[in-house]
Amino acid sequence: MPEQHRADLVLSFTRVRTALGILGMCLPLVLVLGGLLDHPRIDAETGRIEPTISDFYHTTYRDIFVGTLCAIGVFLISYRGYRREAGEWIDDDWLATTAGIGAFGVAFFPNEGGGVTVTSMTQNMLGAEFTPIIHYLSALVFFSSLAAFCFVKFARTCSMGRRRVYIACGWGIVAALVLTAVAVIFKRFVGGVGREMVLDYNLIFWFEAMGIWAFGLSWLTKSKADLALFKRFEKPSDDLPSHSGLDEEQIG
């Protein structure tokens, strides 16, 4: 393959990771700003942040919520990553596809934030009471797959500094899942002061945002690492690392 074509492929590969990272970092910020700056509503004097990120599906920001998740899903399903090597039990392609399917599930199967009112095709087909189940299962698959990327894939071969970033992002995603589950329990089953705190401080929204930001940071870090390594070996193409792609250990 001509060197220029090979360079274009590597840069395209890196841009997919960068796009995923940017989408993950921007989604909660856009929804926060949109919620705070929204026009007055019937039930509130000013705009507000929704209790959860998924609740923005039932607002005028549905297009942003669904569109961003669909873009993330397309990028993840299109992402092939590195081939599986001897001793590895999972490959990038399968893991990214699983995460992408989860993103589509979150986007197209709304939660119960809008009550039992049917507002989507999936609710019309399956019922407004059933789609939240698929929504939450999809979210679990989505975040679990992204955490696995951090622990199993990104931290596999990299410098110690970046490994710490990936591990921290992985644990951030796991912590977001656990804290969100705890907040939901207080909101729905425990009640009392705990429920009031969850609602007053939008804790579920911020826990979800923490997980999405951790996902975005890990992919931005990985894209930057691969781009730096590519530039280092760009001239002598035969010296490019052979580990199914690029090895971050070689850039320190």
Image (cartoon, rainbow, N blue to C red):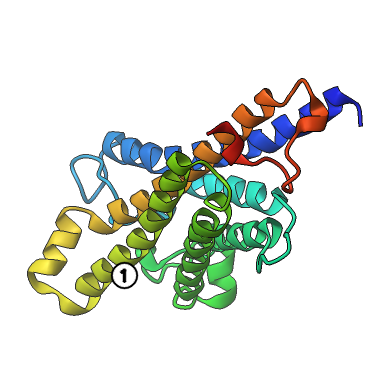
Give coordinates of residue 85: x percent, y percent: 73, 59
Seen in the picture, residue 77 relative to 26 is either above or below; the reply is below
Q: Which residue is pictured at 9% across the width and 72% down the height? A: 192
Instruction: State whether residue 135 appears in this view.
Output: yes
Give the crowd class for mark 1: few <14, some 14-19, many >=20 residues within 10 Å.
some
Residue that badge 1 annotates = 181
Residue at x 23% of width, y 56% of height: 203
In the image, residue 26 sits, relative to residue 67, either above or below, namely above
Q: Quadrant of the N terminus?
A: top right
Above or below, 147 relative to 46? below
Residue 182 occupies quadrant:
bottom left
Tell me the residue at 7%/68% (across/down). 193
- In the figure, residue 32 lies in which quadrant? top left
Q: Outermost residue toward the right?
A: 1
Q: Position of residue 14 (x, y in %)?
A: 65, 35
Q: Is residue 74 left or right of residue 134?
A: right
Q: Nearer the viewer, residue 85 or 115?
A: 85
| Residue nearer the viewer, 142 or 198 | 142
Q: In the displayed image of the protein, which residue is found farthest to the left?
A: 193
Amino acid beneath label 1: Ala
Looking at the picture, how far across and down is residue 39, in whole percent?
30, 36
Q: In terms of secondary structure, where does tag 1 sit?
A: helix
Residue under the point 74% across and 24% down: 234
In front: 62, or 117? 62
The number of numbered discs placed on residues in the rendered structure image is 1
